[in-house]
Every structure is written in C-alpha cells, then in structure tokens.
Amino acid sequence: MRVLAFDTGYERLGVAVLEKEKGPGRAGEETLLHSDCVRTPPHLAFEDRLLILGEAAEAIIQKWQPDAAALEEVYFEKNAKTAMQVAQVAGMLSYLAARAELPLYTYTPMEVKVAVTGHGAATKRAIAAMLPRLVGIAAGKRLDDEVDAIAVGITCLASVR
C-alpha cells in the first residue's frame, strides 16, 4: 500500500509518501519514498496560497499514484482564524483525495504519537527520533511539518489493513 500523508498548514504543508510492501522478504516493511514541505509566501492572499498548495498536492498525487491519503486532524487551542484557514486547507486536500478516488484516513495528534512512539504525550523531538528506526530515512534537518507528515503516513500504514 502506498499512502500520501499531509501535515496540514497554509504557510507550510508537510507532505510524505510512504509504502508498505507485501510479499516474501519485504512483508511489513515501510519505506519513505518522498517527503517535503511545500511553502507559500506570506505576502500572498490566502486564496493564492491555497492554489499553490492544491496544485502541489495534485502534482504529488499524479507523480506518486498513492492508494490512500492521510491527514492529521486540525487542532488549535488559541487562534480561531488560523484554525479556520488550516481547516480550509484540510477540506481542499480532502476534496483532492476524493477526486482522485483515494480513501482518506484522519488521525488525532494523540493517535499519531502513540503509533510512532508508543506514548500519547510524546514530544516532537521523540517523534523525530523514532522515524529513522521505523522507515528508511536519511539523517538531516527537516521542518516539523515534514516530520509530522511522515509520522501521519506511518500511522496510516500501521492502522490500515
């Protein structure tokens, strides 16, 4: 199974494509095929940022031909305007998944933390430390959004049978 996972945002959209192989010698092995962080310029109007993100997501769907898509559920405590805009990005990604006939899976932040670290109160640092142990990921600096997208993809591969 190949999953396209997103960490939803409009300034930075974390993206990861992971695959879980079936068959002799590779059964259950997860592989990171692609990860990135799509950035939008802060001076652009929100709708222009949404267009950039949508076009990038469509290109990734076209290139990687995933079997499913996964998102982390939107959760904000403080800024309602930011939460609404992030929710609009999630809606756009949900639409693109449906248009590409991809099943869409969503996960709470706690579900992602448990799937990756085994602990629901894990820190971002703990999640990042676990990724090389779970998937073939090269060492290097990654933005939190990219790390979170990889973690969402791992969660999806672990939970979907």
Image (tube, grey):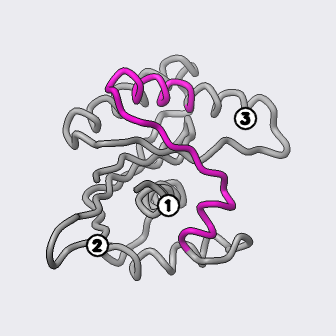
The amino acid beneath tag 2 is Glu
Say which of 35 and 23 sits in front: 23
- Would residue 83 be visible to someone looking at this image? yes
**Disc with the residue nearer the chain's start (3 vs 1):** 3
Q: Are marks 3 and 1 in contact (CB under 8 Å)?
A: no
Q: Which mark is residue 83?
A: 3
Mark 1–mark 2 distance (CA, rounded to whole Å): 13 Å
Q: Residue at x 30, y 63 (%)?
A: 32
Per the rendered image, the range of residues in magenta is 90-116
Mark 3–mark 1 distance (CA, rounded to whole Å): 23 Å
The amino acid beneath tag 3 is Ala
Q: Quadrant of residue 100?
A: top left
The residue carrying mark 2 is 29
Horizontal arrangement in the rendering, residue 138 relative to residue 15 (left or right):
left
Asked if residue 96 is among those painted magenta in the image, a careful observer would answer yes
The residue carrying mark 1 is 155
Mark 2–mark 3 distance (CA, rounded to whole Å): 35 Å
